[in-house]
Amino acid sequence: MKLRAVMAEAARHTQERWEPLVVHHGYKRPAAQGSKACRPRASHRIVARRFSVCCWRTGAFVLLALLLRAPGLWAVAQANPSISGTVSIQGRVFDAQGSAVAGATVQVQGSPPAVADTAQTNQRGEFVFANLGVGSYTLTAASSAMRSHPETIQASQADQNLHVDLTLEPSPAASSASAAPSKSAPAMQAMQFADEPDFTVAAVTDWTAAGGHGSDSSLRTSEALTRETLSLKPSDVAPTPRTDRPAPGQVVASENLLRAQLAAEPDSFDANHRLGRLYLDQARFSEALPLLQTAFRLQPTNFDNEYDLTEACLHVLDLQQARSHLSNLLAARNTADLHRLAAEIDEASGDPLAAVHEYEKAAQLDPTEQNYFAWGSELLLHRAVLQARQVFGEGVQAFPHSSRMLIALGGALFAGALYEDAAQRLCEASDLNPADPEAYLFMGKIDIAAPDPLPCVEPKLARFVQLEPGNALAHYFYGMAVLKQHAVSPDAPTLMEVQTQLTRAVAIDPSCADAYLQLGILKAAQKDYKAAIDDYHQAIRANPQLSEAYYRLGVAYDRLGQRDEAARQFALHDEIRKQQAAEVDRQRREIKQFLVTPPAPQGRAEAP
């Protein structure tokens, strides 16, 4: 067996396989075509994307999301699981300027019964304690050097949904210590956005390959990684416990209760707003909108309701109304959250130039992890690769515990053809949170597309297999990494390990088309064309848009002397490739590219 021929065949035909993406009004949605999915899981960014547990392949349409700039998940604590009750307490945490505070610690204490628990606020500063009993509760919030005054609330009967907002103020100890900041202060406190960016996004133009480097295969991988970057979930910037939404039964109970309250008091601001907000959190935007509009008519000056109404208008693409409400909000408060919301509206309206400037303002007003990530993502989306690297790099320095910032920086480095640097950042991200699959998925993709093996990737993907033995992608990417790392002088045990990993991938997920394709390539290299044909057919059944499988199938039939069947497969390959090339070209035309210039000089420079 010619081992080098096996490696050459696999390397030549393991191009990244990414689906077309349609950009419509600034939002990402799947193209009209469809194919089988590989065990999807949902995440959010304005609309849901589909996360495949199988392989990333041409024509396998990934549903993307934009919730990066939308609210995070509810932060929920079940205050005392041993206590049976249906009382819930929810609210938001604000700073002294009225901005929502993400990552604040909220504590609840009750008597009777004795209750003491904590929850972390989400990206909108929200928290909820569920499953409480009847009694009196005192809540406090803290974040960095700020604390709130205690707020006491009474739950007098079961089936109550209580609301309380908490405002953070600098603690006396923090005020006295402010003159001598500690070296151990959190990075977000130390980051003052003192350095102005050394670039200016001056205009937009039609898509070109400027800003990116490498082959067209690498460019397509870069574009796909960019889309995946936009969907990365907010990550904790400190090692805080993760919280989730209420259990499904609790959500249903809450909805039923709120609907009953609205039926009893249809003109109640509180009833309309709370049910509308629940629907907004559940991405039921068309249901949320009329309730929030009713609440707005009842109390047009309520800031929180108008903020929620603006978001609902954005999600249903009523952009004129979204802008009108946003104008009211900005007249009341000039906050980073509002500028980030303005950027989302601008991007949805097809004005990325205005959007990127709003994201920059948000980062200047409040240099949080979320704001830096949103700004860098917008730059990367519109091919300002070097500038995205700069922003993500500063974000990594300020928020060293943010794995998604490292992943995004890795994607930007890859877009600039800095393949080993990109891999190193992704490997670091996987070490920060070994249980999170995102970093492994990114490194698996860039390892396939990069021209040379990436040293740190194989051992990290081996860990991925150990952590998730039931994940088809883990086996697929690890097998391909082993194949690439031993490309110079592979031996029989190496090839057997590769085949074992690919076989496990298709056993776990029969729709993993790329694994079938690679199995066929390995068998064809051993001149076992009949077995290779079976694998190619399996790949096509799993993904009829996998053009490479038709080409490989044609080659195998030709080797067996079946010329007519070979010609038919080659013709199918050519037709699919033509359609895909046209779709990629259309997508690229829809995404405008930023024109970046150095900043304007502040004054005449003296001659040296």
Image (tube, grey):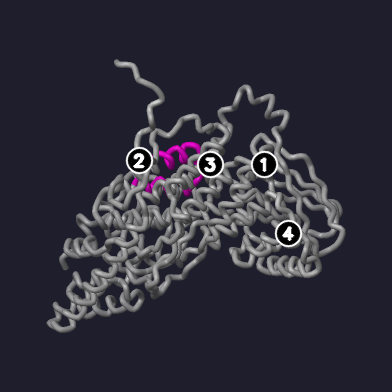
Counting residues from the start of the chain, the first of labels 1 and 3 encountered is 1
Give the Cα separation between the discs numbered 2 and 3: 19 Å
Asked if disc 1 and disc 3 are in contact, CB closer than 8 Å, the reply is no
Q: Which mark is residue 362?
A: 3
Q: Is residue 340 magenta?
A: no
Q: Nearer the viewer, mark 3 or mark 4?
A: 3
Residue 486 falls in which quadrant of the image? bottom left
Q: Which mark is residue 130?
A: 4
Q: Which class describes the residues within 10 Å of circle 2: few (<14), some (14-19), or many (20+)?
A: some
Q: Earlier in the sequence, mark 2 or mark 4?
A: 4
Q: Can you give x and y, in whole percent of width and height, for residue 22 in the image?
A: 39, 63
Q: Which mark is residue 98?
A: 1
Image quarter of the C terminus: top left
The kind of residue tagged 3 is: Ala
The disc labelled 1 sits on which kind of residue? Gly
Residue 472 appears anywhere in the view = no
Give the residues in magenta. 390-413
Q: Which corner quadrant of the image does residue 587 belong to?
A: bottom left
Please tell me whether residue 377 is drawn above or below residue 14 in the rendered image: above
